[in-house]
Image: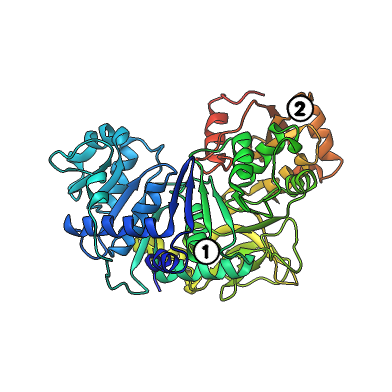
Amino acid sequence: MSVASFLRNGARRFPAKVALYFGEERITYSQLDREVDSLARGLLDLGLQHQQRVAVLLGNCPDFFRAYFAITRAGGTVIPLNPLFKGVEIKYILNDGQVAILITTRSFLPVIEGVWSQISSLQKVIVIGGETEGEVVTWDDLLARPAEPVVVEIKEDDIAACLYTSGTTGKPKGAMLSHGNLVFDTLATAEHIEVGPEENHLCVLPLFHAFAQTVCMLLPIYTGASITIMAQFRPDSVLKEIGAKGVTLFAGVPAMYAAILSTITDPRAFDLSSLRLCFSGGAPMPVEIMRLFEEQYGITVIEGNGPTETSPVAYANPLHGVRKPGSVGLPLKGVRVKIVDDNDQELPVDTVGEICVQGPNVMQGYLNQPEATAEAMKGGWFHTGDLGKIDADGYVYIVDRKKDMLIIGGLNVYPREVEECLYQHPAVAEAAVIGVRDALRGEIPKAFIVLRPGRKATPREFITFCRERLANYKCPRQVALVESLPKTVTGKIDKKQLREANSMGLTGE
């Protein structure tokens, strides 16, 4: 089985069923399958070779689905690009990935034309909208050509997608995910959270990201479910669309849940009767945010997680059985997890160390980076860079990122623990804690807080609040009240950007 087979099987089982909703657009499984065949044939006619890489620079739209499945059906490898990237970032990935073909829209073409001469591998650009000219090919021309079903032999270890990680240090690295990796992770996730063809999944997470690709695209296409696509996240628009399209499953990052809580004053104004399950991932969910959301909306939130390199779901709370708020749940069936110290020695239950993952969902390696691959895969286990622990029942807890841990007077402080405390304060909408330099202690915790609408509080109030609940050395010494926190395009709080802004004095006191 390959990821390309998911759509073919869906079209055989549910030909007339709506696969994709996008605004007023309705696309059935059989229509999507036919269009993907036309595009796959078009790619092959343009000279796409087996396992050549094709970049996709698109926002959330049906064409992303068409492109992804056409590339994989033709035997190519998908490299999704962040639509917010600048020319220099796009150039780096296209060169590093030796990309042969790029699929994008007319609006991005000026950026591509500005760097094309510096990308020796790039042969063709397929543009959605406009006319064919020279090496620029029109998407509509390919889509309009009827084609016989495209059958290309695909092996389990062929690379389906190469996803570039955000790169907290240095340049982004391309995590190579095989068909076997993604098929395993999709099937295991479907079994773990118990979803089937009756669902209507909301896809508002950005599709260039691993979380959206597996949970909002591959998973529902594999099960034969429907998908409601939204181009961007706005809390009121999301809740309206859930009612309008009968969405049953919403997947989001914790910041999305926080945004809904802080901006929607009356949940009863929306028809959410169809929504039966919410899935949170991408970053650890603050326990207080989960509690408030479930209390206000009466909908269960299943928290799971895993880095891009694990396809990406590695662990999740079960739908039935014990669900532990604050935990990212149990490893998927067939996935092994252990906690190690700095010497790579396995640690006992309830001891904090680095989370390591082993299983069929773990990537094939980083493209063009054998040393980085060897470092990440020491001893045959993927080292996630997350600090965490495993309890006696086997549930995994993410304490923090290894790089985010603070050392205050020789003692370890995990910013997430401080943030969890701050979220318990009724005035806090969002909170982030970083370390700032201190002559005496080396560094001290500094908190950045966004207040809930209409709430007032002083920095001293939050310091006192923490000191009543945490050891003094863990408590923020500085608090900045800010209007917003920087976010990555996936909605996670961007601590790298926060540190940079703080070092330049741009965050206030």
Residue, disc 1? 383
208 relative position to 385: left or right: left
The mark found on residue 459 in the picture is 2
Task: Identify whether 327 is placed above or below 168.
Answer: below
Task: Identify whether 288 is placed above or below 42.
Answer: above
Q: Residue furthest right?
A: 468
11 relative position to 359: left or right: left
Q: Indicate the position of residue 220 as horizontal and vertical percent values.
A: 52, 60
Residue 166 in sight in this render: no
Q: Indicate the position of residue 61 as horizontal and vertical percent values.
A: 42, 44
Distance from the alpha carbon under mark 2 to that under mark 1: 37 Å
Q: Residue furthest bottom?
A: 334
Front-lying residue, 222 or 441: 222
N-terminal of the two: label 2 or label 1?
A: 1
Q: Secondary structure at mark 1?
A: strand
The quadrant of the image that shows the C terminus is top right
Amino acid type at mark 2: Pro
Q: Secondary structure at mark 2?
A: helix
Q: Indicate the position of residue 229 as horizontal and vertical percent values.
A: 50, 46
Q: Indicate the position of residue 349 as horizontal and vertical percent values.
A: 72, 70
Task: Identify whether 109 is placed above or below 272.
Answer: above
Give the residue displayed 31% in from the left and 42% down from the top.
Answer: 104
